[in-house]
Image: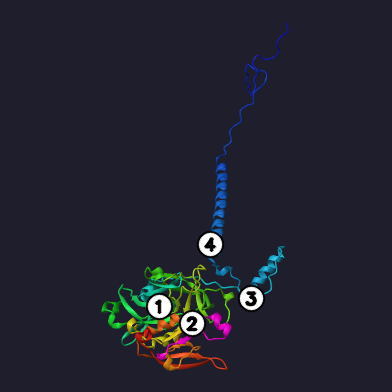
């Protein structure tokens, strides 16, 4: 056999390991491990730095955005953001245009100013009400209501309530202003003061067309405690009012006692006819038109005659629920105090009327018919009481009154109906002399004339 020429021991520096499965494939020798600790630390630091920068940038952006939002919503602009002048603003626009952005041209100035809206202030009115409430009273009216049924007349006692304002005093009387319709046809008047005490009142004078009346309370009928509690109102100037100005209304709403409502001046110089039973479009003839303050302060039945105040506590109007009635909501009216003031002064200067007992009352000695607006327009007659007959031997007969005369006033107090004439005569006794204003017909029309009439007694009228 052949000899083995290879040495029995073969020296090899590379040592190979074999497995039983792949004994013919040599296994790669293990490579020595490299040291990488320093490199990882550097990479980790760089990553942390980048993350910190990202989060810091996001935080700064969020703070800036929030600051700009707060500035815009509050209406404030930082000084650094304000352009120094209009030229700087134009340069900014031109620079933006140079960057390729489309710039919109500003519209030309039309000459109409932009509305500047100041911040409104909510005002507490408690102090004003506290100061003025002692000058406002409740007015109670007891009257005789007459109705006709199948030719028969029936009488019943009625009651109504309203408000009044203490506007002055003299040596013997406390003087109050109210609406004429509050005290109309009164058989008995009384007022209730802020402390709850009551006193009888008498008519001083009235103006039916302006819906104003002045009543008086005898000072001797007021106790000392009430005198210390009440006050005289301060009258303001309604010509200085502006639309939107806050106002306060105080009055005896619904007869429950004094209450307070607030609102604003809705309109000024509202023209409204005396007769509120017809609309403005239906008004005809020479009906007198008065102007009023319109307000959204609630003015309800019982508020008539009460005070409309400005924020200073000055009376700038006399409320009247009769105007407008229940046909509208949120529209109340008041007589401007500047228009009412001269009338009030005139009525305050008149002699106080004390109602005379029925048995002692005086009579003219006539029968009359109302000259209403319709007849006045058709026949060209003045409005008043048309004298249809005169009783012989009475004061009217002796004074020269004849059929066809029209009575328009008693002692300068205007008369437009037989009811008003009878009411006015209740303040005069038999034997008193009154001055009548009459209109007598003539070829050239009706002529005004004043005559003095001595009133007759009830016994003479019954003969």
Q: Along the line of sight, which residue is nearer the eye, 355 or 12?
A: 355
Residue 363 versus residue 72 in the image, above or below: below
Q: Which residue is mark 4?
A: 70
Q: Residues within 10 Å of mark 1 (few under 14, many from 20)?
A: many
Quadrant the N terminus occupies: top right
Lower position in the chain sequence, tag 2 or tag 3? 3
Residue 233 relative to residue 100: left or right? left
- Residue 188 x/y as whole percent: 35, 77
Which of the labelled discs sits on residue 369, or is there none? Answer: 2
Lower position in the chain sequence, tag 4 or tag 3? 4
- Mark 1 vs 2: CB contact within 8 A: no
Q: Which residue is mark 1?
A: 183
Q: Which residue is mark 3?
A: 112
Lower position in the chain sequence, tag 3 or tag 1? 3
Q: Along the line of sight, which residue is nearer the eye, 324 or 228?
A: 324
Distance Cα–Cα, label 4 vs label 2? 78 Å
Q: Which residues are magenta?
A: 369-395
Single out the residue that lies furthest toward the left.
224
- Residue 299 x/y as whole percent: 45, 71
């Amino acid at each position: 056999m052949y000899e083995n020429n290879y040495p029995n021991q073969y020296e090899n520096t590379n040592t190979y390991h074999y497995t039983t499965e792949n004994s013919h494939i040599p296994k790669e020798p293990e490579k020595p491990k490299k040291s990488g600790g320093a490199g990882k630390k550097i990479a980790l630091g760089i990553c942390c730095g980048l993350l910190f920068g990202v989060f810091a940038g996001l935080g700064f952006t969020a703070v800036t955005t929030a600051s700009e939002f707060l500035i815009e919503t509050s209406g404030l602009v930082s000084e650094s953001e304000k352009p120094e002048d209009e030229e700087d603003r134009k340069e900014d626009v031109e620079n933006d245009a140079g960057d390729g952005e489309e710039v919109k041209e500003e519209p030309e100035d039309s000459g109409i100013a932009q509305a500047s809206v100041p911040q409104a202030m909510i005002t507490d009115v408690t102090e004003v009400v506290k100061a003025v409430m002692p000058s406002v009273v409740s007015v109670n009216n007891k009257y005789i209501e007459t109705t006709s049924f199948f030719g028969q007349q029936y009488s019943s006692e009625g009651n109504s309530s309203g408000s009044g304002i203490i506007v002055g005093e003299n040596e013997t009387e406390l003087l109050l202003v109210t609406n004429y319709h509050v005290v109309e046809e009164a058989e008995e008047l009384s007022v209730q003061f802020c402390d709850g005490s009551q006193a009888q009142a008498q008519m001083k004078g009235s103006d039916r067309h302006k819906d104003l009346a002045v009543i008086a309370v005898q000072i001797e009928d007021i106790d000392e405690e009430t005198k210390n509690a009440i006050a005289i109102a301060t009258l303001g100037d309604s010509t200085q009012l502006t639309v939107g100005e806050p106002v306060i209304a105080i009055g005896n709403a619904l007869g429950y006692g004094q209450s307070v409502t607030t609102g604003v001046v809705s309109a000024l110089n509202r023209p409204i006819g005396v007769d509120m039973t017809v609309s403005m479009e239906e008004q005809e003839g020479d009906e007198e038109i008065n102007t009023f303050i319109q307000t959204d302060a609630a003015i309800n039945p019982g508020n008539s005659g009460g005070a409309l105040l400005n924020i200073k506590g000055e009376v700038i109007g006399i409320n009247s629920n009769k105007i407008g009635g229940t046909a509208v909501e949120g529209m109340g009216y008041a007589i401007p105090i500047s228009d009412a003031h001269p009338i009030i002064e005139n009525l305050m200067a008149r002699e106080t009327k004390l109602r005379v007992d029925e048995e002692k009352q005086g009579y003219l000695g006539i029968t009359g018919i109302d000259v209403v607006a319709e007849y006045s327009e058709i026949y060209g007659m003045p409005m008043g009481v048309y004298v249809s007959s005169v009783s012989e031997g009475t004061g009217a007969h002796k004074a020269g009154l004849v059929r066809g005369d029209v009575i328009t006033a008693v002692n300068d107090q205007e008369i437009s109906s037989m009811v008003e004439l009878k009411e006015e005569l209740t303040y005069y006794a038999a034997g008193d002399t009154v001055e009548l204003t009459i209109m007598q017909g003539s070829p050239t029309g009706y002529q005004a004339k004043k005559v003095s009439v001595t009133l007759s007694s009830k016994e003479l009228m019954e003969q």
